[in-house]
Amino acid sequence: MPRAERREPEFYQVIEAWALLDLAESPGTCGDLLERLAEQSASNLAYRVDGAVHLSPRQMNIVLGRLHQGGFIVRDRSANAWVVSEAGQKLLAEFQARAETVEVEKDDAADRFVSMLAPPGAIGMALTLGIDRPTALDVGTGGGFMACKLAAAGLDVMAVDRWAEEGAVGSLAEAEKNACEAGVFVQFRHTDVTALRRRDAFNCVVASNSVHEMPDVPAAFRAVHRVLKPGGVFGGLDFKVCVETFVRLRFHALLALTEGEWRRELRAAGFSRPRVHDLGTRLIILARKPK
């Protein structure tokens, strides 16, 4: 999904917020902002080759025009640059206040996520078919946080991660330690979901705070569709692309998918009628593989 082609309103709202934050630090022209945008978002290249954010001069001028029209920036004639107005300073304070009030804690979001998946949630029907322990795959498990919660909820869990290096934070060794301390069993594997050769193997596949770091989201979603049993459920939990998330996470937040991108990519992979649940600064997405 070429990130340079993003056109969703949420994306531009975040870019407008970034421009205001940046101009509050230092006045600038359209050209200055384009350079700063590429430089500051370059940290995302560690996750995806298209992770950095690039706008055309026309797009940036539209962003500046909207901020100027709203009275949030004004032209400093002496420096021939844009500066933040008093109204803009007030808006920045509002951004910070909202970011602190709408944030959903990771553990709370995870508990709600699991309750929507585990019996009697989205895969509860498996029990009516005589399956005592529905099977689940946790994609991008990291330290095994979500895998442990799923296992504690009664699912038979396999968890995979392609990044996990021995001894690193979020390694599978750490995940196994966390599972042991939680008193649950999870089968951990150092691999990528696209490398799994299974087909129709799991009742449920989850991706918790991992889709935004996947190098090829369409390929990952196709693989998820393949390994799910007919009628199986995919559940995604990730950042919401919004100003409040950006204030907290800066450009890492723009690696996430917008609601429209979630729907389009899941449908393209073969899922039917994805449902999106808004938690404020996070999204829960549920989609089913047709029977």
Image (cartoon, rainbow, N blue to C red):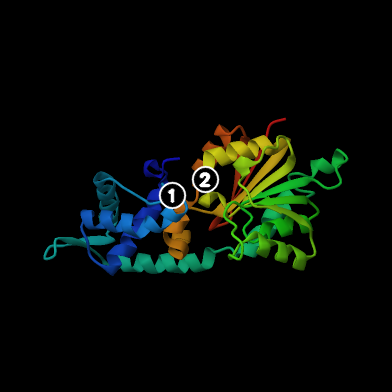
- In front of the other: 52 or 86: 52
Q: Name the residue under label 2.
A: 259
Q: In which quarter of the image is residue 83?
A: bottom left
Residue matched to label 1: 10
Disc 1 on helix, strand or loop? helix
Q: Which element type, helix, strand or loop, lies under badge 2?
A: helix
- Of marks 1 and 2, which one's residue comes earlier in the chain? 1
User: Residue at the spot x=55%, y=49% of the render?
Assistant: 211
Image quarter of the C terminus: top right
Q: What residue type is labelled 2?
A: Glu
Is 103 or 290 nearer to us in this picture? 290
Q: In this view, does 58 lie above or below 188?
A: above
290 w.r.t. 247: above or below: above
The answer to whether residue 173 is above or below residue 261 is below
205 vs 253, left or right, is: right
Q: Identify which residue is drawn at 52% across, 52% down.
A: 213
Tell me: 105 left or right of 204: left
Residue 69 visible in image: no
Check disc 1 and give the amino acid type: Glu
Q: How crowded is mark 2: few (under 14 residues within 10 Å), some or many (20 or more)?
A: many
Q: Which mark is residue 108?
A: none
**Mark 1 vs 2: CB contact within 8 A:** yes
Nearer the observer, 138 or 78: 138
Q: Is residue 233 left or right of residue 65?
A: right
Q: Residue at x 33, y 49 (%)?
A: 54
Q: What is the tally of numbered marks visible in this picture?
A: 2
**To which quarter of the image does residue 193 belong?**
top right
